[in-house]
Amino acid sequence: MPTVAVGCGVLEMGPKPLEQQICDFLTSHQLPSLTVLPLFLLSGVHAEVDIPEAIAQVKASVQQTKILGKSAKLVEFLAQTTELGRNEGIVLFAHGSRRQEANRQMSLLAESLAQSLQAPVIPAFLKEEGSLQQAIFQLQTEGYRALVIPYFIFLGGIIDSLMELIEGIDAARLGPVLSERSEFAQLVLSHVGEALPPAQWRVSL
């Protein structure tokens, strides 16, 4: 997107509040409006409350797309970038949420991915103690080894801990996070394209 102004913003650990980051971006690029793309995979407080509240404080035309996790291309992206070994099933491992709707999205995603790959896919959640181990055991009882797909965009402390855990389980291996998969940037671009025509693209947060 060489002709489009694209920047990044953060909700936490940033030097300024998100609303100030947005204002600074508008000013520095002399933009009358922009679009915020939440790089989140599940609906939750950040996407449904925190970002809209920050946008509401900006005195400019700012709109928000759906979260990346609702991209129409997500299942296709996961299926095309997942290499299953012989007799392998999948554990789709996510953070989880207090909101049941977010967890329900995971179950629907697992079902769609299972249909696409013609392999068993079981969702598991960090927020639920023992959920990952139970999912791996379930696959074992059905005669499958487990490919654990971390449903996270970026590397971090959670993935470090997950890696250590998986290394101690003979019947499981760990797959890459989404941003380490080929075509991830194209997934983001296609999601922007679903929301706006290219002429209106402004910023990805």
Image (cartoon, grey):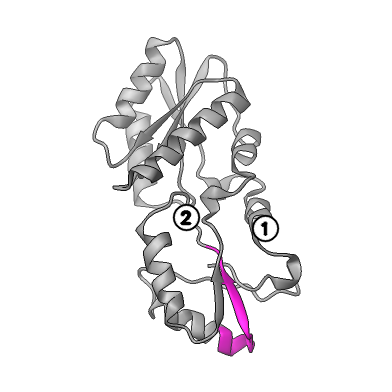
Q: Mark 1 belongs to which amino acid?
A: Leu
Identify the mark nearer the N-term, 2 or 1: 2
Front position in the image: 157 or 74 = 74
Looking at the image, which residue is at 45% across and 18% down? 145
- Is residue 9 in the magenta section? no
Q: Where 41 sits versus 148, above or below? A: below
Query: According to the image, label 1 marks what residue?
Result: 189
Looking at the image, which residue is at 44% across and 78% down? 56
Q: Mark 2 belongs to which amino acid?
A: Phe
Tell me residue 5's x, y (percent).
66, 76
Tell me residue 174's x, y (percent).
45, 33
Q: Where 31 sits versus 51, above or below? A: below
- Badge number at residue 145: none
Query: According to the image, label 2 marks what residue?
Result: 40
Q: Decide if residue 172 is on the left or right side of residue 79.
A: left
The segment highlighted magenta reads 26-37
Which part of the image, by quadrant, shows the N terminus? bottom right
Q: Decide if residue 156 is on the left or right side of residue 195.
A: left
